[in-house]
Image (spheres, rainbow, N blue to C red):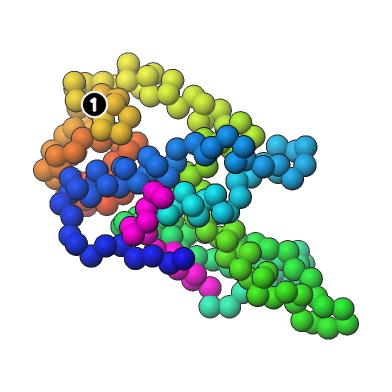
Amino acid sequence: MTQFPILEPLSYKEYTDKYEEIMNVLCEPFPSGTVQKKNDSNKSAHIPVQAYIQRLNKAAGGFYSWTVTTEKPIYHLEQMKLEMRGKLTIMNTSNEGMGFQNFSYIKDSRKIHDFDGTVKAAVRRALVDALNNFEAGWKDLAQYREWGYLIENEGAEHESRKELTEGTNIPCKSCSRLLTNEELEQLQKISWQVMYCDDHVPDFVRKKILSLPK
């Protein structure tokens, strides 16, 4: 399922517009009924990996790559778990993921039962973990997680921050919050034309800002 980003160079505006488009689709809520529970515990609520893969292909097909970074499985014998790791890159932004899968030995041997299937399951879990770092599925799982209030209060937080810190009449392209004078000044220093608040500025733009002389 590995895909590779297109080779044509993009302007800054084209890049940021495309990245924002991908993130908006990637992180939008899944269709009703996608979240499943293994039991009555909220901790068991999850989104099937097939739904994640379908969403990734829809949002970023042609603009992402997925690479398994562990040459061999990592074994956690006390827990009887097999670990695999991978790196998901969407345009120029990468997140790593770790996946764990229970395993068992074939009777009277040290061979793992269904070794290939166990490894593949761990790789799929690693992909889901990487997508989680891109915030995919957060809106769907928030109601089942202790951190859910952060997602539910995100809009209120932005309104509060707007009242406290607004200094311009220029809205963030992503969330529409008015930029502070400091945020605008940082973007102007690197001659950046697409306006983002500090919460939503792309990673590669943030690196440019951080590299400026103090």
Residue 34, given in percent of the width and then of the height, sits at 60, 41
Q: Horizontally, is 63 left or right of 157 in the view?
A: left
**Circle 1: residue type:** Pro
State the residue in front, 22 or 161. 22
Instruction: Classify mark 1: helix, strand or loop.
Output: loop
Image: 75 above or below 30: below
Q: Residue at x 29, y 26 (%)?
A: 176
Residue 153, given in percent of the width and then of the height, sits at 49, 24
Q: Tell how many labels.
A: 1
Residue 68 magenta: yes
Give the residues drawn in magenta, as a range.
58-70
Q: Residue at x 30, y 47 (%)?
A: 19
Q: Quadrant of residue 175?
A: top left
Asked whether residue 129 is in view, the answer is no
Q: Residue at x 57, y 61 (%)?
A: 124
Q: Horizontally, is 24 left or right of 124 in the view?
A: left
The single residue placed furthest to the top in the displayed view is 163
Residue 165, given in percent of the width and then of the height, sits at 29, 21
Residue 184, given in percent of the width and then of the height, sits at 18, 32
Residue located beneath label 1 in the image: 171
Q: Quadrant of residue 85?
A: bottom right
Residue 6 magenta: no
Image: 104 above or below 33: below
Image: 64 above or below 174: below
Q: Quadrant of residue 199?
A: top left
Dot 1, crowdedness within 10 Å: few (<14), some or many (≥20)? some
State the residue in front, 36 or 67. 36
